[in-house]
Amino acid sequence: MSEVPAPEIRAPREVLVRVRAAALNRLDLWMTGGLPNVSPVFPFVVGSDGAGVVERVGDGVRAVRPGDRVMINPGISCGHCPACVQGEEPLCRDFRILGEHVPGAAAEYVVVPDENLAPVPEGMGWPEAAGFSLSTLTAWRMLASRARLLAGETALVWGIGGGVSLAALKIINLLGGRAIVTSGNEVKLERARELGAAAALHHGREDVVAEVRRLTGGRGADVVVESVGEQTWANSLRALRKGGRVVVCGATTGPSAGFDLRRLFWNQWSILGSTMGSRREYAEIVRLAHQGRLWPVVDQVVPLAEGVAAYTRMQRGEQTGKLVLEVST
């Protein structure tokens, strides 16, 4: 950790936020290890997720004012290209993510556009507010927008315990679906059952594909939520029903995956990529959060000065929920 100059408001619609808490994501691990086509200028502030209090606003800001408690949507777009005009900001050619392409929230202050801020729900603490945006938005776009999960459908979620997988579990239940989740950790499986998983499978001891087939009467899952990558890809396809959808937001164990094209067209699968979410989708999950229906699960809160311990816990995959850094009090 090092001292860097405080960021400054440079445009009329920008807002300076005093950060109270920031949450870690897998992206933060990738940033420390290096990402292709991403060249941060050091010293660089990581952290895509954060929440805090509005400190100052630009001359053109009307939506928030100093003193407001806000959560940050980490996806920043140009606002005027065809994709943005159509409400598909993640497809913007200039789409950027806080903490990856621009300085992030794991610092005392961060500057973001006013349209990237939302009010913190009544009663929500800073850890939950900090851990809400990226994981919930990613999972919502995957399931509600890309895969279009329907009530009564079954979704398989690999590796329950991370922010996106736990948000996916909550969203599957919210949409009226049935969630089958996996983990190699019994504590995580029990927590998933408490959160409403219809089945929780130990992927180190059970044949996940066979169990999914059994639980669906031989049919297979309607949707597979895939963020693991190479390690699970073949079984994701084997567990999928004819006409099913695989929706992919990550590749934790490796980026390369293959399949027999004949199986693809014969089974009429849909393979869907998904990144972050639009402003419209963010507004929807914020609405649900204000109803108390989509709050994130928090694993641990640690002081910013002890952030290395949180990184280590995430690297080892020990967390069940969001790891949050307390930046200020």
Image: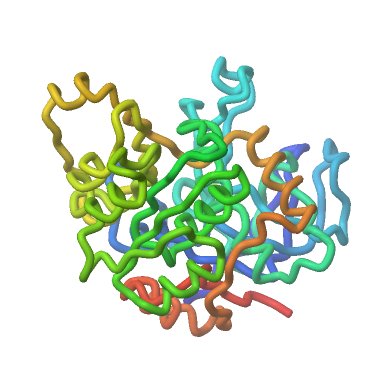
Residue 324 place in picture, x, y as percent: 56, 72
In the foreground, 315 or 186:
186
Is residue 188 among the parts visible in the rendering?
A: yes
Q: Is residue 276 above or below residue 269?
A: below
Foreground residue among 144 and 326: 144
- Residue, far front: 217
Quarter of the figure that contains the C terminus: bottom right
Tell me where residue 60 appears, x and y as whole percent.
Answer: 83, 36
Q: Is residue 284 above or below residue 306?
A: above
Exactly how many numbered labels are in the figure?
0
At horizontal 49% and vertical 49% (from top left) the residue drawn is 178
Residue plotted at (48% across, 39% down): 153
Q: Residue at x 55, y 62 (%)?
A: 196
Report the colour scheme: rainbow
In this view, 114 is above or below 214: above
Choose between 209 and 109: the one closer to the eye: 209
Q: Residue at image x 45%, y 57%?
A: 165
Question: Residue 288 location in percent, x, y?
Answer: 73, 48
Horizontal and vertical percent position of residue 303: 58, 83
Lateral position of residue 205 relative to residue 183, left or right: left
Asked if residue 35 shows in the view, the reply is no
Q: Most extreme residue toward the top, as rendered?
A: 82
